[in-house]
Amino acid sequence: MSEKYEDARLDRAIASILDVWRGSGKISCVKISTGSMEPFIRPGAIVVVDHSTKDFRIGDIVVFRNSDHMTAHRIVAVNEGHSGIIFQTRGDNTADRSESVPEALVMGKVIEVHNSL
């Protein structure tokens, strides 16, 4: 079997297993398309996101709205300002860049990582 076929099978298997969780509306799966979180999360990985938690801490990987797409990055600092909590986030592979993310844009916390085989 080809590697591409095996990746597709893995993606379908993970999606099937997690269907029960997704039905609750509190858990979802997101496929990662870039290498900004390498080596921990590789391109093509599927991450499981918990949308029910609001308990975010330094070191957590969160998924947030970023213009026209979703981004998964690690929280490196938490600041409280006049407009609420702002998270400083950064990809593990992008140590020279960080983003300020208002708490309202955070969709959830990554609770599982399934890297492609």
Image: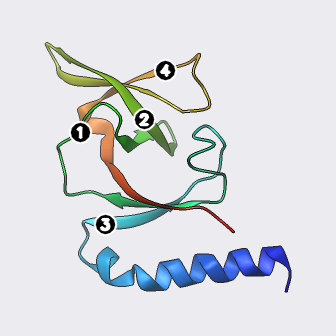
The reply to whether dot 3 and dot 1 touch (C-beta < 8 Å) is: no
Q: Position of residue 52 (x, y in %)?
A: 19, 57
Real-space CA distance between mark 3 and mark 1, rounded to the nearest whole angstrom? 16 Å
Residue for point 81% across, 74% down: 3
- Mark 1 sits on what residue? 56
User: Where's the N terminus, which quadrant?
Assistant: bottom right
Real-space CA distance between mark 2 and mark 3, rounded to the nearest whole angstrom? 19 Å
The amino acid on which the numbered mark 4 sits, given as a three-letter code, is Ser
Mark 2 and mark 3 lie on one chain; the one further toward the N terminus is: 3
The answer to which image quadrant residue 38 occupies is top right
- Mark 4 sits on what residue? 98
The reply to whether dot 1 and dot 2 touch (C-beta < 8 Å) is: no
Mark 3 and mark 1 lie on one chain; the one further toward the N terminus is: 3
The reply to whether dot 4 and dot 1 touch (C-beta < 8 Å) is: no
Q: Which mark is residue 27?
A: 3
Q: Secondary structure at mark 1?
A: loop
Query: Looking at this view, is 24 or 35 the one in front?
Result: 35
The amino acid on which the numbered mark 1 sits, given as a three-letter code, is Phe
Residue for point 25% across, 35% down: 57
The amino acid on which the numbered mark 3 sits, given as a three-letter code, is Ile
Mark 2 and mark 4 lie on one chain; the one further toward the N terminus is: 2
Residue for point 13% across, 13% down: 82
Q: Is residue 21 left or right of residue 39?
A: left
Q: Residue furthest right?
A: 2
Q: Residues within 10 Å of mark 1 (few under 14, many from 20)?
A: some
Q: Secondary structure at mark 2?
A: strand
Q: Residues within 10 Å of mark 2 (few under 14, many from 20)?
A: many
Real-space CA distance between mark 2 and mark 4, rounded to the nearest whole angstrom? 10 Å
Q: Secondary structure at mark 4?
A: loop
Mark 4 and mark 3 lie on one chain; the one further toward the N terminus is: 3
- Mark 2 sits on what residue? 74
